[in-house]
Image (spheres, rainbow, N blue to C red):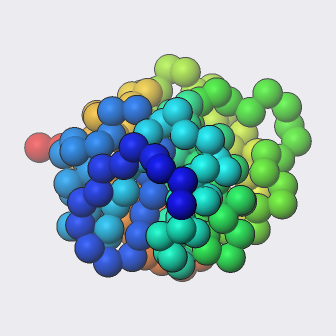
Amino acid sequence: MTELKTSELGEGAAVVVMGDGFANTEAHRLLATRFRVVAIDAAAAPEAVAAWVAGQGLEGVGFLGLGTSATVALKAAEASAERAKCVVLVSPQPLPASPDPIAPGLRLPKAVLIGSRDASQPRDAIPVWRRALPGSNVVLVFDAGADVVADRHQAFADAAGDFLDRQGRFAFMTESVARLPA
């Protein structure tokens, strides 16, 4: 089994999160009320993550990539093959450089969460991500900037959690995303 630096909270279906600074945050704790959430060191290679998932005997794993770790999450899910259930990309960077789909062989349900105030995303970010990840759900998290997790951790946990629970049955608008903070 491959040794990776991990931080784990919660019980239930496994969700593997790749991204700097996520471990033991409020967002990690909120998502862990619904899932077994394993934060893995962002520097981990996708193949190492897939080997760790296999070594743990995990099945039906949700993969979640934050910021610049979005590509790692996509590749780790692809390398995990039948063990992977879905992929969620949150505030993914960088933007797709070409109109060609990224991870074209990945047939899992996919979601992208981006902030409505994220200046790094183009005005047409929703169709850009839909072209880049065909068949994906793209969710605009209101009043969040370039770091959805830090800006709106409850909305992040609600939207990501709803997708992880429902995948293909996920509705674009959920109460958690549409609601502005008090």
- Kindly identify the residue that appears in the image at 55 percent across and 21 percent down: 120
Q: As displayed, is residue 160 above or below residue 147?
A: below
Residue at the left extreme, as displayed: 182
For the C terminus, the quadrant is top left
Q: Position of residue 78 (x, y in %)?
A: 72, 59
Direction from residue 86 to residue 26 in the image, left or right: left
Q: As displayed, is residue 81 above or below residue 155?
A: below
Residue 124, picture quadrant: top right
Residue at the top extreme, as displayed: 119
Q: How many marks?
A: 0
Q: Position of residue 60 (x, y in %)?
A: 53, 77
Q: As displayed, is residue 53 above or below residue 29?
A: below
For the N terminus, the quadrant is bottom right
Direction from residue 149 to residue 53 in the image, left or right: right
Q: As displayed, is residue 59 above or below residue 56?
A: below
- Kindly identify the residue that appears in the image at 37 percent across and 65 percent down: 161
Residue 72, picture quadrant: top right
Closer to the camera in the image, 49 or 92: 49
Q: Where is residue 7 in the image (x, y as percent from the top left)?
A: 30, 50
* Residue 176 visible to the viewer: no
* Residue 97 visible to the viewer: yes
